[in-house]
Amino acid sequence: MRELFDFFIRNSKWFVYAFFIVVSCMLLFHSNPYQHYVFLTSANSVTSTVYELSNNVTSYFNLREINEDLNRRNAALEKEVIDLRESLQRFIEKNYADTLVIDPEVDHFDFIVAHVINNSISRPYNYITLDKGSDDGVKAELGVIDQNGVVGIVSVVGRKNARVISLLNPNLRLSCKIKNSDNFGSLVWDGNDPTTALLEELPRHTTYTPGDTIVTSGYSAVFPPGLPVGIILDDGRDHNENFFTLKIRLFADFTALGNVQIVTNNYAEELKAIEQLDNTDNKKTTRQ
Amino acid sequence: MSKTAIILTALFLVLVPAQAVIFNNLVLFNVALPLVFIYLIISLPVTLSTNWSITIGFAAGLAVDIFSDTPGMNALACTTLAFLRKPVYHLYMSYDDDLLGLRPGISTMGWAAYFKYMLTMVFIYCLMVFSIEAFQFFNIKLLLERTIFSTIFTFIIIYAIDSLSFKRS
C-alpha cells in the first residue's frame, strides 16, 4: 500500500499533467458550441467587465472611421429619400392630373402638370420657376393655373425649367370678367398684398355684389374662358369717369404653391394667325 | 517564497487581461500573434514543483481561453509548456543551479542561456497553439508562418517586458 502511495507521489506530476490535459481536451473537443458553461466563455461577468473597461477606452479610436461610414451612409440614404420623394411627386402629379375636372368647354386646352421650384411673393415684380421646360412641351405665353385658380403666364422657357410671370407682378394684366356677366376688366396686382389684386377698367354700368366670382374672360389664347381667378372683396375706391376698380381676393394661394398646370392651347397658333390676318386686312383696307 | 507568490499573482492579474485586451488585437500581417502571457510560465521559479507549475499554467491558459473564447486551446498548450519547463531549462543550465531557487532571468542565468531558454519556450508554445488551431483547417504553410512569426514577435515583446522588470529590480 505504501509503495502504491509512493508511486503516486513520485509520479504525481504525470497524473496532474494527464488530468489537466484531459480537462483541456474535453473543453477543446466539446462539439456543441452552444452548450458551453457560461463561466467558461467571454460572456461571464469578470471577462465582460474587463472587456467593457477596455472598450471604454478603445471605442474612441475608431470614431473617425465610424463617423465617415455614417456620413457615407447618410449621404446614400439622403439620395434615396430624394429619389423616393421625386417618384412620389411624380405619382402625386399623375394622380392630380387624372382627377382634375376639366370643363368640356376647354377641350382644346391641354394641361402639363409642373412643380413650383421657386416662388417669390414679397418683391414688387414676382416670378415663379417651374420644373418643366421646352423638353416637356412648355412654350412662352402659356397660362399657368393651380387647383384654385389662375397663377400666371409663362415668360421664359429653358430646356428643363420655365419662368412664370406671377399674377403678383404689375407687368401682367389679365383679362377677366364677373361670372354670369359679360362685362370684362383687366386684373392687375397693386403690389401690396399677395392675396388681393385689383380688377380695373370695369364699365360703369356693371352690376355686381361683393362675393361674386371673377373668372377669366377667354379673350386671349392664354387661358380658356371661365377659369376662376378670385372673388370681389368690396367696392372699388377708384371711380373714374367711365370705369371703376374692384378689389379682388385671389383664389390661388401664392404663399403655398405646389403643383400647377400649364395650359396649352392647341389652337393658339391658329388664333394668332387669324388675328394677324385681320390686322393685315385692316391695313390693306386703310390703304385702299 | 511569499514574495515570489505575490509577484506571480500580480503577473497573472496583469498579463492575462493584457493578453485579452491588448495582445490578442496586436496581430501583425495577419500571421504574427504575440502570446505574451506565457512569460508567467517562463518566469516561474526553477524549484517550483512541476505539479504547481502545471496548475498555474493550466489556470493561466484557461483564463486566456475564457477571454478569447477558445476553450481548451491555450489551457492544453500551457499545461504542456509548464510540464516541459524544467526539461527545457536543464537543456541550457546544469542541475546545480536549482539550489538557488531563483526565477529564470538574465541576472540568474546569464544572457545567452536565458535567450535560448526563452526562445525555446516561446517556440514550443507557438507551435503547440497553432497546431491545435490547425485541427480546424489544416494549412502547413500558414501553420509554419504563424508559428515562426509569432515566435519572433512574442519573443521581442517578452524580452522588452523582461528588461523593464529587470531594471526595476
Image: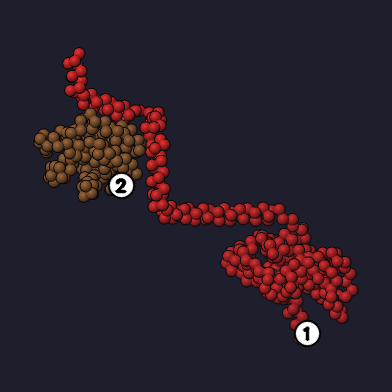
Q: Chain of mark 1?
A: A
Q: Is residue B90 left or right of residue B67?
A: left
Residue type pointed to by label 2:
Leu
Q: Label 2, on which residue?
A: B26
Task: Give the quadrant of residue A106.
Answer: bottom right
Chain coloured red: which letter?
A: A
Q: For the residue labelled by badge 2, is the local secondary structure a helix, a strand or a loop?
A: loop
Is residue B130 visible in the rendered structure shown here? no
Other-residue count near label 1 (Cα within 10 Å), few / some / many at <14 / 14–19 / ≥20? few
- Give me the residue at 76% from left, 69% from top: A196
| Label 1 to label 2: alpha-carbon separation | 102 Å
**Marks 1 and 2 close (CB-CB < 8 Å):** no
Residue A282 at what x, y percent from top left? 77, 80
SS state under label 1: helix
Q: Amino acid at mark 1?
A: Thr
**At 14% from the left edge and 42% from the top edge, which residue is drawn?**
B109
Q: Quadrant of the N terminus of chain A?
A: top left
Q: Residue at x 84, y 64 (%)?
A: A211
Horizontal and vertical percent for residue A274? 73, 73
Taking the image as shown, residue A236 lies to the left or right of residue A114, namely right
Does residue B92 lie above or below A15 as drawn?
below
* Residue B11 percent coordinates (x, y): 28, 41
Rendered hue of chain B is brown
- Mark 2 nearby-residue class (10 Å; few <14, some 14–19, many ≥20): some
Nearer to me, A252 or A272: A252
- Which sits in the foreground, A78 or B127? B127
- The residue singled out by tag 1 in the image is A286
- Residues flagged by tags 1 and 2 on a common chain: no
Where's the C terminus of chain A, which quadrant?
A: bottom right
Q: Which mark is residue A86?
A: none
A210 vs A86: above or below:
below
Residue B19 appears left or right of A187: left
